[in-house]
Image (cartoon, rainbow, N blue to C red):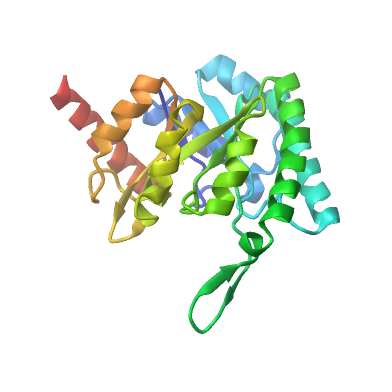
């Protein structure tokens, strides 16, 4: 199992991330395309490859949260597919083996008695669009030896999402990310689907959750963190400690290592 940290909004450079990663003796950094200093056009991939060679730090990439490859707007869908495709090419040059992504549940209409998700109402169109994108990206990812891993964002309990995921993970190099905090926010409906497709889990985002507030410091919430860590270790997958400040990250890693000492 490899343990990693996310790119931080309080930082503005890769060098700052590397410095903290070395200080905490972690294995990898998840870059994040929501942050301009992590845009692929702003990072020379050969620089990342050299960091990996010289410092032993690997990298993954989190695609933009709003990248909706199932959108009904064909020109927008094609634009996102191009962004993903360009990122896969960039990742190969950078030595990056995993890109993390979301499946977007889309707009919803609030009626007097319920909420209607438009992608649910038009689920066949949504699934067709998403799978059209996945087929293209799966082929590219397989050629470049990169995994595309779809993260739960408190939406894996929705049937139209499950139907789309079921088909997606039949394609080469398409896997699942288990985000533990998002899972807790979903009242663990995400977990039910993930456990039914355990063989497809290739990555984990581990953070605590307290009263439906996720991205909390490890061991300061309601989750059994060691049980989650044991799962990652048994699967031998990369586990990201996804707390979003340097201070919270240092506290989390310190607490985790103290717990691990007690268990051995």
Residue drawn at x 57%, y 50% is: 161
Residue 108, quarter of picture? bottom right
Asked which quadrant contains residue 251, the reply is top left
Q: Is residue 32 visible in the rendered structure shown here?
A: no
Which residue appears at 69% of the width and 49% of the height? 127
Looking at the image, can residue 228 be seen? yes
Determine the image quadrant of residue 123.
bottom right
Give the residue displayed 23% in from the left and 50% down from the top. Answer: 222
Q: Looking at the image, how many numbered discs can be counted on the residues? A: 0
Q: Quadrant of the C terminus?
A: top left
- Residue 165 in the image: state x and y as whole percent: 59, 41
Q: Is residue 264 left or right of residue 11?
A: left
Report the residue that reaches farthest toward the right.
75
Q: Residue furthest bottom?
A: 112
Relative vertical location of residue 189 with respect to residue 45 in this rendering, above or below: below
Residue 101: x and y, percent?
A: 60, 42
Position in image of residue 58 (x %, y %): 54, 24
Q: Observer-nearest residue: 6 or 138? A: 138
Q: Residue at x 66, y 24 (%)?
A: 172
Q: Is residue 3 left or right of residue 221?
A: right
Which residue is outermost to the top? Answer: 53
Q: Along the line of sight, which residue is nearer the eye, 216 or 226?
A: 226
Across and down, in percent, residue 48 comes to: 63, 26
Q: Quadrant of the N terminus?
A: top left
């Amino acid at each position: 199992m490899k343990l990693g940290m996310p790119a931080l909004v309080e930082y503005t450079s890769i060098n700052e991330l590397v410095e903290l990663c070395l200080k905490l003796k972690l294995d990898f950094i998840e870059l994040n395309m929501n942050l301009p200093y992590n845009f692929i056009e702003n990072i020379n991939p050969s620089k990342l490859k050299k960091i990996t060679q010289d410092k032993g730090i690997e990298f993954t990439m989190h695609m933009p949260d709003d990248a909706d490859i199932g959108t009904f707007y064909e020109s927008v869908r094609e634009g996102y597919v191009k962004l993903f495709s360009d990122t896969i090419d960039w990742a190969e040059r950078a030595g990056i083996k995993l890109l993390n992504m979301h499946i977007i549940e889309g707009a919803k209409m609030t009626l007097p008695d319920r909420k209607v998700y438009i992608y649910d109402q038009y689920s066949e169109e949504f699934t067709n669009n998403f799978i059209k994108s996945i087929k293209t990206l799966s082929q590219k990812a397989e050629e470049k030896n990169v995994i595309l891993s779809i993260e739960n964002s408190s939406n894996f309990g929705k049937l139209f999402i499950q139907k789309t995921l079921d088909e997606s993970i039949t394609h080469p190099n398409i896997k699942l990310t288990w985000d533990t905090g998002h899972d807790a926010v979903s009242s663990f409906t995400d977990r039910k689907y993930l456990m039914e497709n355990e063989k497809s889990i290739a990555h984990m985002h581990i953070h605590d959750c307290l009263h439906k507030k996720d991205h909390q410091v490890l061991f300061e919430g309601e989750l059994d963190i060691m049980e989650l860590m044991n799962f990652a270790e048994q699967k031998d997958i990369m586990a990201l400690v996804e707390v979003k400040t340097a201070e919270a990250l240092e506290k989390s890693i310190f607490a985790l290592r103290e717990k691990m000492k007690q268990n051995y």
